[in-house]
Image (cartoon, rainbow, N blue to C red):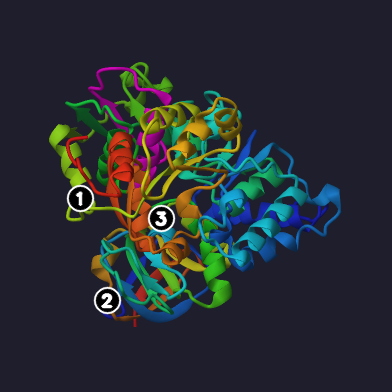
Amino acid sequence: MRGGEFGPLRQWAIEHQIKVGTYLGAIDFVPVTQAHIMADTESLGRAGVEWLEHWTVLPLAQRRVRIPTITDPRGTDFAHAQKLKQQTWMLELERRAIAAFEALGVLMTDTCINYQTIMPPVRGEHVAYGDTGVVIFCNSVCGARSNFEGGPSALSAGLTGRTPRYGYHLDAQRHATFVVELSSTPRELSDWGVLGGLVGRLAGDYSQVPALVGIDRVPGTDELKHFGAALASFGSVALFHIAGVTPEAVRFADVIAEGSALPTHAIGEADLRAFQARYASDIGAVDLVVFSAPQLSLMEMRTLAGLLDGRNADIPLFAVTSPQVKPDCDRLGLTARIEAAGGTVLSGMCFYQSYAREMAEANDWHRLATNSAKLVNIIGGYGYRPVLLSMAQCVEAACAGGKLVARTPS
Amino acid sequence: MSGEIFYAAAGIGRKVRATALVASDGFSARYDLDRVRGVFSRPEHKLAGQSYLGRVLVLDAAKGGVATAWMLHEMKARGVMPAALVLNRANPIMAQGAALADFTMLSGFDCDITKAIRDGAEVEVVPGGERPFIRMV
């Protein structure tokens, strides 16, 4: 590949991987079975789309990915772009990006919950995933092995079928680096996100691996989804262990390096509430409610539909799910129930990846309520004032014209 | 401390010389920046409201998601770009973004580099060679 025998795209890909691997101390490559590319056009920009397009003129054999390669959410749901007041140029750029990826053989799955809907990896499987929430869930809950692979690197992995062996592909990097003792197990999904945020702030960087003890039950998939997404977002963390729950920590001692004495932090109910209260505690109403980041599972959509039955949202309420879940929501009547209450079900996008700043300006949106700790961590940079509530509290706010009637406890 | 050399564990990109913008805070292109105006936009960031154009950003740790891997390339194409990024602790995304964009980055120091480099100092960043380094000039 370095010599160009497989074409200039694969030559670029392997050279890119060598640069990255050299920087990060990789000793060699490891074969990977799947790649997952984050590539919304707000991130790509025109330059990124043009860069992708210039490869599409290559012969088929030179431009097609070698392993199953899928995509993270896109920057729009074309069916609802007008309602979101997204501009024509945004949609055109999305169409061009989609066409380019399809020409490279990429499957446009447009999801950040592929571990719930597409093909979850198995323990020990080496993969090259983008989206930090995907990586941390698959590393921690599935026991797979991936680093954060940004779009160019995930595409490279798809093209070469390998990735530099550093970080979480290595046994030595997967030991816990600190312990968190919980005296209160979260109940709401938003609280799992809060816990992720708290642990992420303790972690501070990519090399840190928290190990949690004290959880009084086995968490569900959606709970660990929100926990992991927030932990990765606040802390740039790619792996966690939960004693007796996650596969590498079934025996807690297995994730503790021999002879190490790890720092230990305690987290309780008061810490959860204090963290939640940091977000816009001084505002009395919101302009919109967003359920997104990560995309909602079928079970979350079912819960939301139940909360909205017989109600009416007086402000915009968006429920964002994946193109794999959406048809089931349609078939099972969940979409109709949510939309009968004034909500909108969006598919294949993620709110913060969809020109959030421009949507805010076009719609005069400033204050946003969500149950996603990851979203509150990100959306402030786009000019919003976010409030973190439980799903039920978000629905109450939406049905009260945006007025925040019950803030804490969730 | 003018002239003192601070060696990094890893470097990528080209040699640059520019004014340092320093803070003990993290970095993520998506989370922290208004990439149209070229300023730090996250209200909680210690550099909120400040322009990063043409500056050597000296910060603590890489934060946030994977978008920076594309965004550095996009920012460079529009010329709304810092001169270099110098971090105590990088993550793979920063390295991947720097590799795509041919952007200058250093990370991994024996000291806290955000304490060692004075905000506003003219600095030279040399990512190549056996021992990448930054120094105030």
Q: Is residue A237 magenta?
A: yes
Q: Which quarter of the image is occupied by the C terminus of chain B? A: bottom left
**Residues behind callouts 1 and 2 on a single chain:** no
Q: Distance between the residues labelled 1 and 2?
A: 29 Å
Give neighbour class at mark 3: few <14, some 14-19, many 20+ (Cα, 10 Å).
Answer: many
Q: Name the residue tied to disc 3.
A: B90
Residue that label 2 marks:
B119
Q: How far is mark 3 from mark 2, CA to CA? A: 20 Å
Identify the chain of the residue marked 1, using the numbered disc in the image: A
Q: Which of A15 and A81 is in front in this view?
A: A81
Same-subunit check for callouts 3 and 2: yes
Q: Which amino acid does label 3 sit on?
A: Ala
Instruction: Indicate the position of residue A315 as horizontal and vertical percent values.
Output: 37, 50
Mark whose residue sits in front, 1 or 2: 1
Q: What residue type is labelled 1?
A: Arg
Magenta-drawn segment: A210-239
The mark nearer the N terminus, 3 or 2, is: 3
Query: Callout 1: helix, strand or loop?
Result: loop
Q: Farthest left residue?
A: A270
Picture residue at 28% right of the left edge, 61% below the top: B25
Residue position for label 1:
A278
Tag 2, which chain?
B
Residue A262 highlighted magenta (yes or no): no
**Which quadrant, please, contains the N terminus of chain B?**
bottom left
Chain holding disc 3: B
Residue B112 is left or right of residue A111, and the answer is left
Q: Can residue A170 be seen in this view?
A: yes
